[in-house]
Amino acid sequence: MSAWVQWLRGMGETPTAMISVLAAEGSAPRGAGTRMLVTAEGQKGTIGGGQLEFRAIEQARAILGLPVGAWRVQDYPLGPLLGQCCGGRVRLLVEHVDPAALGWAVEAEPGRMLETVLEADAVTRRIHERETATRQSARGDRPGEGARFIEPVGEVPRPVYLFGAGHVGQAIARHITGLPLQLAWFDTREEQGHIDGVTIMPVEEIAGCIAEAPEDAAILILTHDHPLDYALTLAALQRDPVAFIGLIGSSTKIARFRSRLIGDGVPEEALSRLTAPIGVPGVKGKEPDVIAIAVIAQLLQLRGQ
């Protein structure tokens, strides 16, 4: 964070805007807490590039015409118009920043929490030693004056592409709240569409979402349908490596999948990247919450990798 603070201070009196990702759901290029700075002539940092960033920069340069402290919250559905095939949403905070109020960015060390409050004519921030993070939604009413957010600082959240919105998927999504993990959640069943954060994709298109996952992503495959699980696993192993690929299932299912994958030309090196079954070894129990906690603990073991 301090690198772009130094850049900003070097700009002197140049009007500057800041774009912050408040919330991201579905297949989003960056997670909550990602920030970038924008001037009339340049920018520092990125919220993921592409049409989303282009539109956000337009908004940031427009807000430079308003007084310092001015802000607005903007929602962006991520569909074909923004170059995203797998849906999702991003909620951004765009503000005309006061350089004198950026001390929080210097103090933003790993392990601390950042409080952001939207006030009538300014956005105020301060660093806390300890406080529970609040998960923001990219859906529903936009936050307005008086809204307060708490987020961890100093660590980029790992994207988690979760396929399956059954009992285990819902438990994983529930326990991810407040952790340095950014959830992109998919299912093919229309009846699961009422669950907050789930993107419903056609069966013939959902495997394409694997290609959009960034290289630091964790891919979790636990749908209601074995053929769909196989298609997703094959797609994950055939693309460039990601940080983690996990598959839920019995020993019989996993043995059959491995045999089919070899038959479909997946080399042993790629097959070695598959973690199956998912979850920290030695954790007993088939309850959804037990499985979810074992899986999330396994993802947290990736920190620093």
Image: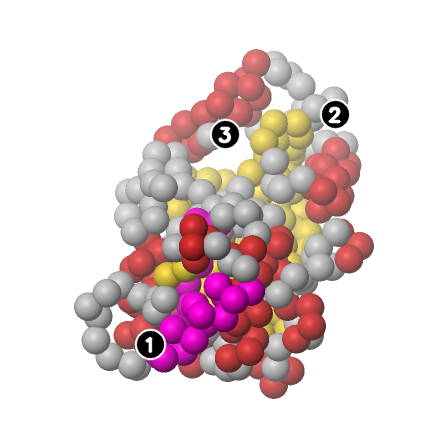
Image marks 3 and 1: residues in contact by CB distance under 8 Å: no
Q: Residues within 10 Å of mark 3 (few under 14, many from 20)?
A: few
| Whole-number angstrom distance, CA of label 1 to CA of label 2 | 58 Å
Residue 51 picture location, percent across and down:
75, 45
N-terminal-most mark, 1 or 2: 2
**Mark pair 3, 2: CA separation:** 20 Å
**Residue 155 in the image: x percent, y percent?**
40, 41
Image-based side of 41 in relation to 68, left or right: right
Residue 122 is labelled as none
Label disc, if present, on residue 251 of the rendered structure:
1
The picture places residue 76, in percent across and down from the top left corner, at 70, 55
In primary-sequence order, the first of circles 3 and 2 is: 2
Residue mark closest to the camera, 3 vs 2: 2
Residue 266: x and y in percent read: 51, 58
Three-letter amino acid code of the residue under disc 2: Ala
Residue under label 2, please give it: 40
The residue depicted at 41 percent of the width and 27 percent of the height is 106
User: Residue at left 67%, top 19%?
Assistant: 14
Mark 2: secondary structure:
loop
Query: Which region of the structure is painted magenta?
Result: 242-264
Number of residues whose C-alpha sits closer than 10 Å to that of mark 1, classed few (under 14), some (14–19) or many (20 or more): few
